[in-house]
Image: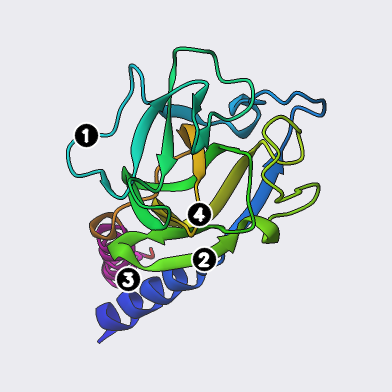
Amino acid sequence: MRFKTTFLAAAAAVALAAPAYAVTVTTITSGTSPAVDPGFASLGQTLLYDFDALTPSAGNLTGNYSILVAPGNANSAAPSGTAPGTSYLSVPNPASSGTATILLGGAYKSASFYWGSIDNYNTVEVLGIGGVVLGTFGGAGLPSPVDANGNQSAFTSNMRVNFADNAGITGFRMTSTQFAFETDTYAIGAAVPEPATWAMLIAGFGLVGFAARRSRKTVSFVTA
């Protein structure tokens, strides 16, 4: 009974410490036009995909998309500042309306990408563990100073957008009802513990409590 009580107390403590599902969105701009990618160093993140040397593995990028080469084509413009001849992700393709899903290969406390020529018909869903949708954000709903007018060079419509949720971000589902939704340089923050790790922590707390109680019971004192 004491073991059970200790175990449940430990489980409750971990549950209380576990994060709620609430995505925090921040934007980082270069501050001047024509815009350039301000990068992800200030976010403490690591580059995951650039669609050149670093590309999603099989199954981690699906749906209606194309990998284009800057400066783009008649339907899609590379995010401002993208070096000519380098690649970026454009959604949709081939029709003017569609959805693509990009997975990060794990669960992370934060993830960001450089979003180019932001439009009010671009929408991103932030995905969590098990494919749950943690949040949905339209281009016009991003934090200031965004202008979701499709401008191809202004820093207010070409910016790095960062999503943070301690519950774990596993990917993004991008939808655009017109050409196009353009992104590049996906970066990730710290990984979150897998569910099995949480279970081991809970069990560990319970065993420690049980051992402590047993040790208290076996202590004896000898008096002269």
Q: Give how far apart the Cα atoms at labels 1 and 3 are.
A: 50 Å
- 210 or 110, nearer to the observer: 110
> Which residue bears the numbered disc 3?
213
Query: Which residues fall within the magenta stretch?
Result: 198-222
Circle 4 is placed at which residue position? Answer: 178
State the image coordinates of residue 168 (x, y, percent, origin top left). Answer: 42, 55
Which tag, 4 or 1, sits closer to the chain's start?
Answer: 1
Q: Residue furthest bottom?
A: 1
Residue contact between numbered discs 2 and 1, judged by CB atoms under 8 Å: no
Q: Are marks 2 and 3 in contact (CB under 8 Å)?
A: no
- Chief secondary structure of the magenta span? helix
Q: Nearer the N terminus, badge 2 or badge 3? A: 2
Determine which residue is flagged by label 2: 135
State which tag comes first along the sequence, 1 or 3: 1
Callout 1–callout 3 Cβ contact below 8 Å: no
Residue 214 belongs to the span the image colors magenta: yes
The residue beneath circle 1 is 57
Front position among marks 1 and 3 = 1
Quadrant containing the C terminus is bottom left
Amino acid on which disc 2 is placed: Gly
Residue 64 horizontal side relative to residue 182, left or right: left
Can you tell which of label 2 and label 3 is closer to the viewer?
Answer: 2
